[in-house]
Image: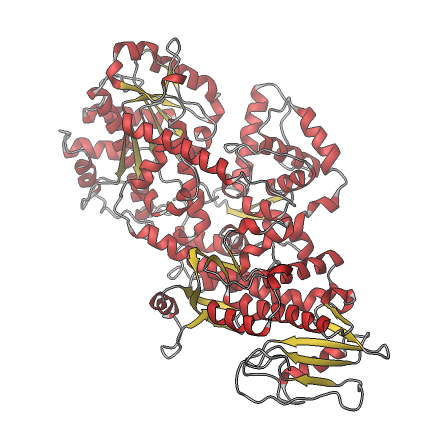
C-alpha cells in the first residue's frame, strides 16, 4: 500500500514538473496529506482549491472530535486501519550499493474512509464517484466501515431499486439479443519445454524450433538467462535458481505472462482479418509496457503470421499524457486503422471513455454494428464501443505482490503485517460493535480460515476474501469501459487470463447491478465450478462468525454498561426492548431507529424466506454459533469439523415458545407493541440472542406487567442510576422507602437452588457493586418443568445482603402464583 501511494506521489510529481508547477513533498504534514487525500477522494484538479480549502476550514481543521463519528465511536474505541490510519516500514537490501540497506517509512493518518465519514456526518448530502481512484485499501472505499460510522445512510426505496434493476436488465438483454459477447479464457498450452509450450500455443504458425528459441531468448522483460529448453513449470514455488536472484519458477512466470498476452494480441489480429471493421482493441496488464517490449510483441506477431503491418501496438502510460495519446488512437480507429492499446489497469481502467467516432465505419460496414436503442442514436456523430479487450490477472492490487520476490515470504509478511487489515476487509469485524485487539483478530481469523492464519499450507493467500473482492471490482470496472454507447460492434471479444477465474467472487457480482460484459464473464465457464460453492461456504462461515461476534459484544456491553455514556445506555435499553417486541422480522426495513439499524442486523439470521424454526449448535454459553440451518443434515455437516459425533443439533421451535407465552401472558401484548404471533418470517433471532437476550427481555416485560397489575411500586431498568445500569433488571420500592432490586429469570430446569448456587453467589457479588439497595429478589417467570425449585421468601422483613428467590411467577398452566 505504501508503494502504491508513493508511486502515486511520484506520478503526480512528474505531471507537476511537466506543467512547470511545484512538486508535492514526498513527506507531507497533516494538512498537505488532507489536501492530497481530499483531491483524490473528490477527483478534482489542483486548480480547484476553493472546495478543498472550504472543506478544510469548515469541517476538518481543529476538529479532533470529528475524527470519530457515528455509533461505532461511542460504543468502543475503533482501532481499525480506517480510523487510526497506518504506518508501513519497508526494508530493502542494496547489496550493490555502498549502503547495505534502506528503510522507507510511509504513514497515512487520515484515510479516505475517515475523511468521507467525517464529511458525510456533517453534510446533508454527499455523493461519491464510483470510478474515482482513492488511496484506500485496494484502491476502493471500505464502504461498510463508512456506513457504520455515519448517523444516517439513505438507501433508495425498493420501488426505485426495482425500477433501476429492471432498466439495467433490459439494457443488458438488448445487448445480448442484438449483439454477441464472446468470452475466452486463455492459458499457456501444455508442453514439456518452453519451446513446446510456445509452439503448441500457436498451432497455425509455421515457425521452426530455432526461430521459436530466438523469440524466447529475446522475450522482454524475461529474466536474463531464460532458455527455450527450460522445463515448463508455471509455478512460483520453485526455489531452483538460474542466477543468484532469479529462480526457474520466476522465469516461467514471466514466460507464461508474456505468452498469454501474445496469444490475446494474436486473437485480436485474427478478428481484424476476419472483419476489417474490427479495429479497436485494448490489453490491460499490471504494469505499463515499454516501447521496446511492444516492438518484440509486434515482431513476434509478424513472424507468427498474425500481423502484416507496423505500429499496430500503441503503448499508453500515465507519464506520457494518456488523454492525448488516446485521442490520437481514437482518430486512427475512426479511419479504420487497426490499433491495439497496451496499457495498465492503473492508467486506464477507471473513468476512461474508450468509445470513438465511427460514422465512416458504420457507412462502410453497416452489417458489423448494432444499435441498442434508436432513441439515443446520434446518426450525425455516432460513437461506438471498442471491439475487444484482454485482462491480465491483476497482481498489483496489493503492494509487493510481484514475481521478483519470493511468493511464500511475501504472503507470510503480508498476513503478519496486515492481519488487522485483512480482518476488517473480510468483514470479520463489524465496526458497529466493540473493536478487537490483535489477539482477537488472530483468534477469529483462525476460526474463519479453519486454522492458524500464518500457516500457508492451511490458509493459502488466494483464499482471502478481501482480495477476491478487489479482483472482482477491478474486472467489473474494467469491463465497464466497453459498454458506454448505444452503438455496439455486432461481436465484442473479451479475453481473460484464466488465473482470474479462481479469484472472482461471483456472489459479489450477483448482489449488484452490473454491465452486460461482466454478466457474460461470470456466466462463462472457465472450468472452475467450485468457486460459487466455496464462496457460499465462506459467506456462511462469515455470517456465523458475525453472529458469534455479536453475542460476544452483548456480553461485553452488559459488563461495561455502567461506564458508558447515558446515550449508549439508552441505546442498550432500546435494543433489548426492540428484540423483546420483535422475535422475528419480515424485513430489516422495520427497524426505523437510525442507530438501531446500524447494529440490529447482527442479531437476526437471514434465512432468505419465511421459516418457523431452525436447527442449530452452539458452544460457550451460546456465544459461539457453530452451525445453523433449516435442514438437520446440513447443520450436522457444518458440525462435522471438530464436534463429537454424539453431539446433536438442537431445534429452536418458535411455535412451542408461542404457546407457552400465550398461557402466561393473557393480556393483549400486541397493543403494547409485543409481537407474540411467532409467525414464519425471513429473519429470526440467532440462538444466542434468543436465549441470552430475548428470554430475559420478554420476561422483564411480563414481570413488569404483573407488578403493575398488582399495584407494586416497580421501576424497570431505565430508572436505574447510570452507575447501576444492567447490574439488575429493575427495583421495587418498599413501603418504608427501602430499595429491593429485582432480577428476572426465565429458567426452564437449571434455576438457582440455594445460597451456594453460582448464580446466587454472582448476584451477591453484584450487590457489593451498587449503593441504592441492599437486597435482591430473583423471580423466575414460568414453571417450565416439574423440577422443584427452592423458594427463599421474605418472611420477617427485608434483610441486608440477602438474596430472595421465587421459583416461578406462573405455573405450567399459566396461572399466576
Q: How many marks?
A: 0
Q: Is residue 179 visible?
A: no
Residue 409 image position (x, y, % from top left): 43, 54
State the residue in front, 786 or 66: 786
State the residue in front, 247 or 125: 125
Outermost residue on the right side: it is: 736
533 left or right, relative to 78: left
Q: Is residue 336 above or below residue 515?
A: above
Q: Is residue 140 above or below residue 418?
A: above
Q: Is residue 26 above or below residue 16?
A: below
Figure coloring: secondary structure
Q: Residue at x 62, y 71 (%)?
A: 699
Residue 55 image position (x, y, % from top left): 70, 32
Q: Residue at x 67, y 61 (%)?
A: 572
Residue 162 image position (x, y, % from top left): 45, 37
539 left or right, relative to 279: right
Q: Indicate the quadrant where residue 777 lies.
A: bottom right
Q: Quadrant of the C terminus?
A: bottom right
Q: Residue at x 20, y 21 (%)?
A: 274
State the residue in front, 569 or 211: 569
Q: Is residue 463 visible?
A: yes
560 left or right, relative to 15: right
Q: Residue at x 56, y 51 (%)?
A: 590
505 left or right, relative to 92: left
Residue 279 image position (x, y, % from top left): 29, 19
Amino acid at each position: 500500500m505504501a508503494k502504491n501511494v508513493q508511486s502515486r506521489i511520484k506520478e503526480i510529481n512528474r505531471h507537476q514538473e511537466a506543467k512547470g508547477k511545484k512538486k508535492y513533498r514526498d513527506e507531507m504534514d497533516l494538512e498537505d496529506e488532507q489536501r492530497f487525500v481530499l483531491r483524490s477522494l473528490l477527483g478534482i484538479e489542483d486548480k480547484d482549491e476553493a472546495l478543498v480549502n472550504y472543506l478544510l476550514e469548515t469541517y476538518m481543521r481543529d476538529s479532533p472530535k470529528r475524527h470519530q463519528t457515528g455509533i461505532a465511536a461511542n460504543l468502543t474505541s475503533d482501532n481499525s486501519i480506517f480510523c487510526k490510519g497506518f504506518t508501513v516500514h519497508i526494508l530493502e537490501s542494496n547489496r550493490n550499493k555502498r549502503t547495505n540497506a534502506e528503510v522507507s517509512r510511509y504513514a497515512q493518518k487520515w484515510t479516505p474512509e475517515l475523511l468521507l465519514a467525517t464529511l458525510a456526518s456533517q453534510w446533508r448530502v454527499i455523493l461519491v464517484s464510483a470510478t474515482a481512484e482513492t488511496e484506500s485499501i485496494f484502491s476502493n472505499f471500505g464502504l461498510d466501515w463508512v456506513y457504520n460510522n455515519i448517523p444516517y445512510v439513505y438507501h433508495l426505496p425498493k420501488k426505485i431499486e426495482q425500477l433501476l434493476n429492471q432498466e439495467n436488465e433490459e439494457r443488458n438483454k438488448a445487448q445480448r439479443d442484438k449483439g454477441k459477447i464472446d468470452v475466452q479464457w486463455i492459458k499457456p498450452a501444455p508442453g514439456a519445454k518452453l519451446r513446446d509450450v510456445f509452439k503448441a500455443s500457436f498451432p497455425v504458425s509455421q515457425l521452426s524450433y530455432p526461430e521459436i528459441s530466438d523469440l524466447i531468448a529475446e522475450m522482454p522483460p524475461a529474466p536474463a538467462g531464460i532458455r527455450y529448453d527450460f522445463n515448463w513449470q508455471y509455478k512460483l514455488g520453485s526455489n531452483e535458481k538460474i542466477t543468484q536472484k532469479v529462480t526457474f519458477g520466476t522465469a516461467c512466470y514471466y514466460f507464461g505472462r508474456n505468452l498469454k498476452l501474445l496469444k490475446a494480441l494474436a486473437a485480436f489480429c485474427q478478428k481484424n482479418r476476419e472483419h476489417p471493421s474490427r479495429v479497436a482493441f485494448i490489453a490491460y496488464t499490471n504494469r505499463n509496457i515499454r516501447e521496446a517490449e511492444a516492438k518484440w510483441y509486434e515482431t513476434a506477431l509478424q513472424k507468427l503470421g498474425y500481423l502484416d503491418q507496423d505500429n499496430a501496438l500503441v503503448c499508453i502510460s500515465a507519464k506520457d499524457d494518456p488523454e492525448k495519446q488516446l485521442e490520437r488512437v481514437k482518430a486512427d480507429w475512426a479511419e479504420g486503422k487497426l490499433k491495439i492499446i497496451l496499457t495498465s489497469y492503473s492508467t486506464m481502467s477507471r473513468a476512461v471513455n474508450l468509445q470513438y467516432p465511427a460514422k465512416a465505419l458504420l457507412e462502410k460496414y453497416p452489417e458489423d454494428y448494432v444499435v441498442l436503442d434508436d432513441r439515443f442514436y446520434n446518426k450525425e456523430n455516432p460513437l461506438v464501443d471498442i471491439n475487444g479487450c484482454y485482462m491480465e490477472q491483476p497482481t498489483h492490487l496489493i503492494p509487493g505482490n510481484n514475481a521478483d520476490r519470493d511468493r511464500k515470504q511475501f504472503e507470510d509478511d503480508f498476513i503478519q503485517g496486515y492481519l488487522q487489515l485483512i480482518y476488517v476487509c473480510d468483514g470479520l469485524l463489524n465496526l458497529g460493535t466493540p473493536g478487537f485487539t490483535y489477539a482477537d483478530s488472530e483468534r477469529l481469523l483462525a476460526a474463519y480460515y479453519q486454522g492458524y492464519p500464518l500457516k500457508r499450507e492451511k490458509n493459502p493467500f488466494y483464499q482471502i476474501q478481501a482480495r477476491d473482492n478487489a479482483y472482482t471490482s477491478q474486472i467489473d470496472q474494467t469491463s465497464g469501459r466497453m459498454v458506454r454507447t448505444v452503438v455496439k460492434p455486432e461481436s465484442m471479444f473479451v479475453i481473460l487470463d484464466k488465473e482470474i477465474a479462481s479469484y472472482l467472487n461471483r456472489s459479489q457480482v450477483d448482489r449488484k447491478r452490473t454491465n452486460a460484459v461482466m454478466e457474460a464473464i461470470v456466466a462463462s465457464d472457465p472450468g472452475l465450478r467450485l468457486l460459487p460453492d466455496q464462496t457460499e461456504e465462506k459467506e456462511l462461515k462469515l455470517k456465523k462468525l458475525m453472529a458469534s461476534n455479536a453475542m460476544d459484544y452483548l456480553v461485553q456491553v452488559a459488563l461495561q454498561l455502567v461506564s458508558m455514556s447515558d446515550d449508549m445506555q439508552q441505546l442498550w435499553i432500546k435494543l433489548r426492548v426492540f428484540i423483546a417486541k420483535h422475535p422475528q422480522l419480515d424485513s430489516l426495513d422495520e427497524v426505523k431507529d437510525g442507530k438501531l439499524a446500524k447494529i440490529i442486523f447482527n442479531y437476526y439470521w437471514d434465512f432468505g424466506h419465511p421459516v418457523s424454526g431452525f436447527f442449530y449448535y452452539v458452544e460457550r454459553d451460546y456465544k459461539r454459533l457453530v452451525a445453523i440451518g433449516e435442514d438437520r443434515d446440513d447443520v450436522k455437516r457444518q458440525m462435522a469439523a471438530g464436534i463429537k459425533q454424539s453431539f446433536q443439533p438442537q431445534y429452536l421451535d418458535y411455535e412451542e415458545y408461542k404457546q407457552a407465552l400465550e398461557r402466561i401472558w393473557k393480556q393483549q401484548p400486541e397493543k403494547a407493541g409485543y409481537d407474540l404471533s411467532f409467525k414464519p418470517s425471513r429473519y429470526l433471532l440467532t440462538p444466542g440472542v434468543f436465549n441470552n437476550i430475548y428470554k430475559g427481555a420478554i420476561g422483564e416485560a411480563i414481570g413488569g406487567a404483573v407488578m403493575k397489575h398488582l399495584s407494586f411500586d416497580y421501576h424497570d431498568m431505565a430508572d436505574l442510576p447510570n452507575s447501576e445500569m444492567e447490574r439488575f433488571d429493575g427495583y421495587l420500592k418498599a413501603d418504608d422507602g427501602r430499595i429491593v432490586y429485582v432480577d428476572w429469570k426465565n429458567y426452564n430446569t437449571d434455576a438457582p437452588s440455594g445460597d451456594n448456587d453460582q448464580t446466587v453467589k454472582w448476584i451477591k457479588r453484584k450487590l457489593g457493586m451498587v449503593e441504592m439497595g441492599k437486597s435482591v429478589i430473583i423471580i423466575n417467570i414460568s414453571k417450565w418443568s416439574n423440577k422443584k425449585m427452592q423458594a427463599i421468601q421474605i418472611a420477617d422483613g427485608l434483610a441486608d445482603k440477602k438474596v430472595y428467590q421465587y421459583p416461578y411467577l406462573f405455573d405450567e398452566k399459566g396461572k399466576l402464583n
